[in-house]
Image (tube, rainbow, N blue to C red):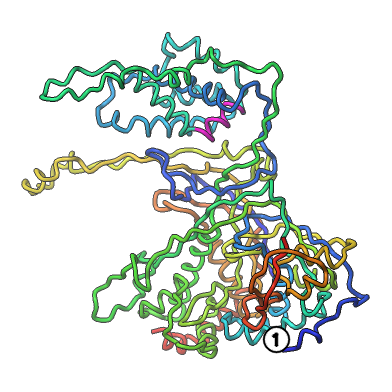
């Protein structure tokens, strides 16, 4: 087995999308892990009180936001935005840095005079790790409590002047539990601090499937170019570029046919595929890429320090276009400008990753193909998503390829190009 | 295929007890804890037939004859290899839901190669044979796992380091990748192993006083082979 443990460094921001959005932000893909270096802090608070303190901090910031000058469309999604910004700010190292970041994100120059006392008391009750870890883990609960509280104490709207009285006066009475949730003076710190250990974590990472898929497409594209393949039936395209599909087209296990597929494309022996009834087992193993961090005991810094947020906008150029005349009827129908703002999490420039490639096959042709795949990866060092807007470029260290290691594979393709082309086209 | 009696080599003096400690690089995906004899059986078959790129039910059935190399590797009681299933700290570990994706690549730089003939250049990626996948995958988040076995530790270690990159499902895309595997000789007796492995045939369980629930299951690798499925006890 050839096993290459190497490292790479992000050159510029790196994004690898997940299925989860936090408000207006697309989160980086994460994987649950058991931290090898768990966060340990000493606390005088219970779990409930810890959330109460964090909610109090959030409340102080909320009240200091200038809601008056805010556009109505923004206010509609204000809680999404608030949670996103809360999570982003919680990536700080200390609680003061967190407060600076959160206030900065909302252009707050000073805390509301009615909240300074509560905020100071709340901050004094918790350590850096305690507050930040609570916000990272419980941001939804904090926002929910805060929202319930704010809704309860909001002054009643003007009575409805229509036929029906829609406002229910009962709803305007603040629930004692909600009020209590924000009462910082009801927090009773214990006399002796208790050790709290946070072992579970969600670490940002790049999936092996993503890296493998990227290299697969690179080498298959090169394979088609070298052999002069210009048109392939879509089933065969799927076999080469996406791993194929299992069906009953071959009815039985046609081993000769499968061998022929590998002979006609040695990269299939490396990346595997599905042909008819058969699965070709790929011999390449691509591990997940993890940042070197304290949580995996591979670095001195927490991964939280590497995470950043990129803010992007898309403008509706039609608003400023002068030289092109638009169809008036269509313009009337689509009055709303087609523009948006979006955010996504990235790992910052300079983040170092650990990663492994492995090749199980002792077959010299497959090994040569493996080295060709490594060369293709080295010459196209981009991983993750949104590469078209400058994300995902990497610098590779320690991925050494022996001289002329891929010659056998390339010679094989050149020698058999005619037969290969006829087979695939 | 050899009969169970022929595969019984229990008491072979050249075999000894071993513990394999595994430090995982990434979470392990499995439904039932992986069996050590199964992993080594795979490595053994690949070692003999590395040139056989094909992995299909037909070839594995054919290759499964070479799982009978087992008696060279493991001590066996009536053809049951004395190897445990994966053990892990059930308090510290937890389950998590991951996903893997597969898609028909429609990027112009690649899909320019597709010949659609006279039909329209379109592919249904929402269903049918070319549909895109986002498949959930349950994983066990564990930093460490360990196995026990009675057998030829040196040979197994060599096979393991040569052929086993990871354990469990979706190893090719990085799940269950192994950072380090350490083989250590330990004192073991047959009941230690049998009570920590997957299903064992009822007669053997009765002979060694092992209790558990009954099920019809495979008792030796390859576990899915119908010939290997008998009335078993799953040790509890």
* Residue drawn where x is 49% and y is 58% of the image: B136
Please name the residue that numbered disc 1 is placed on.
B65
| Magenta-colored span | A130-138
Read off the chain for label 1. B
Does residue A2 appear to the left or right of A229 in the view shown? right
Magenta includes A133? yes
Question: Where's residue A27, x and y in %?
Answer: 46, 44
Question: Where's residue B229, x and y in %?
Answer: 65, 78
* Residue drawn where x is 53% and y is 66% of the image: A376
Image quadrant where residue A286 sits: bottom right
Split into 4 quadrants, where in the image is the C terminus of chain A? bottom left
Q: Secondary structure at mark 1?
A: helix
Question: Where's residue A211, x and y in %?
Answer: 53, 60
Helix, strand or loop: magenta stretch: helix
Does residue B111 appear to the left or right of A6 in the view shown? left
Residue sitting nearer the eye, A309 or B81: B81
**Is residue A325 placed above or below A92 in the rendered structure?**
below
Does residue A162 appear to the left or right of A108 in the view shown? left
């Amino acid at each position: 087995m050839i096993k290459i443990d190497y490292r790479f460094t992000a050159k510029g921001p790196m994004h690898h999308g997940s299925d989860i959005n936090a408000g207006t932000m697309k989160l980086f893909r994460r994987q649950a892990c058991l931290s090898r270096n768990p966060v340990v802090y000493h606390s005088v608070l219970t779990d409930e009180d810890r959330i109460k303190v964090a909610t109090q901090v959030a409340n102080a910031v909320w009240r200091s936001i200038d809601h008056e000058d805010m556009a109505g469309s923004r206010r509609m999604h204000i809680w999404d935005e608030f949670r996103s910004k809360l999570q982003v700010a919680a990536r700080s190292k200390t609680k003061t840095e967190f407060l600076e970041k959160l206030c900065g994100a909302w252009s707050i120059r000073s805390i509301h005079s009615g909240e300074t006392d509560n905020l100071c008391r709340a901050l004094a009750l918790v350590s850096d790790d305690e507050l930040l870890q609570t916000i990272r883990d419980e941001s939804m609960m904090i926002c929910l409590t805060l929202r319930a509280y704010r809704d309860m104490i909001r002054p009643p709207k003007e009575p409805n002047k229509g036929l029906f009285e829609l406002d229910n006066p009962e709803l305007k009475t603040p629930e004692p539990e909600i009020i209590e949730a924000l009462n910082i003076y009801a927090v009773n710190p214990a006399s002796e601090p208790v050790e709290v250990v946070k072992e579970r974590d969600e670490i940002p990472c790049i999936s092996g499937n993503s890296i493998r898929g990227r290299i697969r497409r690179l080498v298959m594209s090169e394979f088609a170019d070298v052999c002069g393949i210009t048109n392939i039936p879509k089933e065969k395209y799927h076999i080469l570029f996406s791993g194929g599909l299992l069906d009953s087209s071959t009815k039985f296990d046609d081993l000769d046919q499968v061998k022929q597929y590998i002979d006609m494309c040695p990269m299939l022996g490396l990346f595997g595929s599905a042909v008819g009834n058969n699965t070709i087992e790929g011999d390449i193993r691509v591990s997940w890429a993890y940042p070197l961090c304290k949580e995996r005991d591979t670095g001195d810094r927490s991964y939280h320090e590497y995470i950043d947020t990129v803010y992007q906008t898309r403008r509706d150029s039609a608003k400023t276009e002068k030289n092109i005349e638009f169809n008036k009827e269509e313009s009337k129908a689509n009055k709303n400008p087609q523009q948006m703002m979006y955010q996504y999490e990235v790992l910052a420039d300079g983040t170092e990753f650990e990663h492994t490639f492995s090749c199980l096959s002792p077959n010299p042709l497959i090994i040569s193909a493996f080295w060709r795949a490594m060369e293709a990866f080295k010459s196209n060092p981009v991983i993750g998503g949104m590469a078209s807007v400058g994300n995902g470029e990497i610098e590779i260290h320690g991925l050494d390829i022996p001289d002329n290691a891929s010659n056998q594979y390339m010679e094989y393709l050149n020698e058999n190009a005619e037969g290969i082309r006829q087979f695939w086209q | 295929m050899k009969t169970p009696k022929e595969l019984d080599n229990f008491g072979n003096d050249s075999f000894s007890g071993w513990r394999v400690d595994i430090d995982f690089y990434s979470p392990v995906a499995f439904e039932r804890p992986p069996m050590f004899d199964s992993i080594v059986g795979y490595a053994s078959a690949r070692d003999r037939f590395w040139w056989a790129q094909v992995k299909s039910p037909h070839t594995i059935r054919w290759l499964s004859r070479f799982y009978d190399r087992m008696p060279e590797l493991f001590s066996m009681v009536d053809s049951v290899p004395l190897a445990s299933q994966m053990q892990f700290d059930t308090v510290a570990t937890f389950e998590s839901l991951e996903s893997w994706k597969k898609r028909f690549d429609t990027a112009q730089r690649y899909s320019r190669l597709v010949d659609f003939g006279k039909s329209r250049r379109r592919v249904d990626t929402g269903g049918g044979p070319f549909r895109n996948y986002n498949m959930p995958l349950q994983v066990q988040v564990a930093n460490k796992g360990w196995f026990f076995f009675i057998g030829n530790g040196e040979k197994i270690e060599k096979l393991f380091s040569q052929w086993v990159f990871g354990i469990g499902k979706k190893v090719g895309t990085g799940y269950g990748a192994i950072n380090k595997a350490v083989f250590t000789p330990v004192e073991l007796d047959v009941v230690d192993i049998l009570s920590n492995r997957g299903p064992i045939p009822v007669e053997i369980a009765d002979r060694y006083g092992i209790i558990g629930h009954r099920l019809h299951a495979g008792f030796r690798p390859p576990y899915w082979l119908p010939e290997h499925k008998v009335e078993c006890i799953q040790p509890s």
